Image: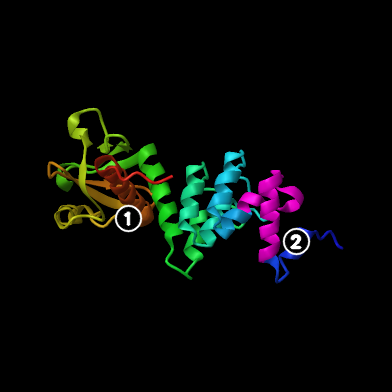
Amino acid sequence: KSGETAITLSRLNQNRDLFEKVMLEFALEKGNRNAGGFYAVHCAARRGDLGAVRLLTSRGYDVNVPDGDGYTPLMLAAREGHGRMCEILISCGAHCDIKNVKGETALSLARKNSRRQNDAECVILDELARKLVLGGAYVQKHTKGGKGAPHMKVIKMVEAAGLLRWGNSSRRNVICREAEVGPSSGFQRLRRRKGDADEPGVFRVVTTKNKEVHFVCEGGLEMAELWVRGIKLVTGEAIFGQQRDT
């Protein structure tokens, strides 16, 4: 009645879980894609069914297609706090930056989940940070420990070598021993007279040769945190072989 289907009615039914399980098994057996409004990958992702998602994606199901409500499988997995599921979907090409009509993203949905330790948020932040540092971006680079005038540079991580790069010379291709958000105390003292000692978006690295370098990114604290997270992540993977398990 009124255009309702078995799918929409099942959402109101106390036996929804059983109904979804039957529909998912049918989709796995028959391979029907989004038949009658049932989105198999989305259902499996929300339920945390890793085996089903692996099987469906191996058959070519698109992990970035939104369901009838505008949610991608990654968004649903993130909302439920399924960290391992988020890893699998990302390894299959799921995009973290897709927004629905409400302006929600996988990250914002993961952050709404306070029912359990939220591994999903960590997985998504890692992927966003990885993409940021490997893709690179313009930032302001300070010189002479803060004594000189800052200037724009493109910085990026070189994945295989774990290098932070902002030029061609060896002095501009460094391995970071430390990466932290915010300025060092020495930098603050030098920049206080300039009025930008606590500028939003400041982060710093210390190289293996004990050289401290300060940068300022657009996007304030949140972006600075992503830069630091990404630098640590890619450096750790290159040096210690901490590759993500797919």
Q: Main secondary structure of the magenta part?
A: helix
The amino acid type, in three-letter code, at marker 1 is Pro
Please report the residue visible at 26 percent of the width from the left and 37 percent of the height from the top.
163
Q: Secondary structure at mark 1?
A: loop
Please report the residue visible at 73 percent of the width from the left and 69 percent of the height from the top.
13
Asked whether 41 falls inside the magenta stretch, the response is yes
The extreme top residue here reads 168
User: Which numbered dot is residue 81?
Assistant: none
Left or right relative to 11: residue 57: left
The mark closer to the camera, 2 or 1, is: 2
Picture coordinates of residue 147, whole percent (x, y): 15, 46
Choose the circle earlier in sequence order: 2 or 1. Answer: 2
User: Which numbered dot is residue 200?
Assistant: 1
Residue at which label 2 appears: 8
Residue 64 or 147: which is nearer the viewer? 64
Q: What is the span of residues highlighted in magenta in the rendered image?
A: 17-42
Q: Secondary structure at mark 2?
A: helix
Picture coordinates of residue 131, whole percent (x, y): 41, 42
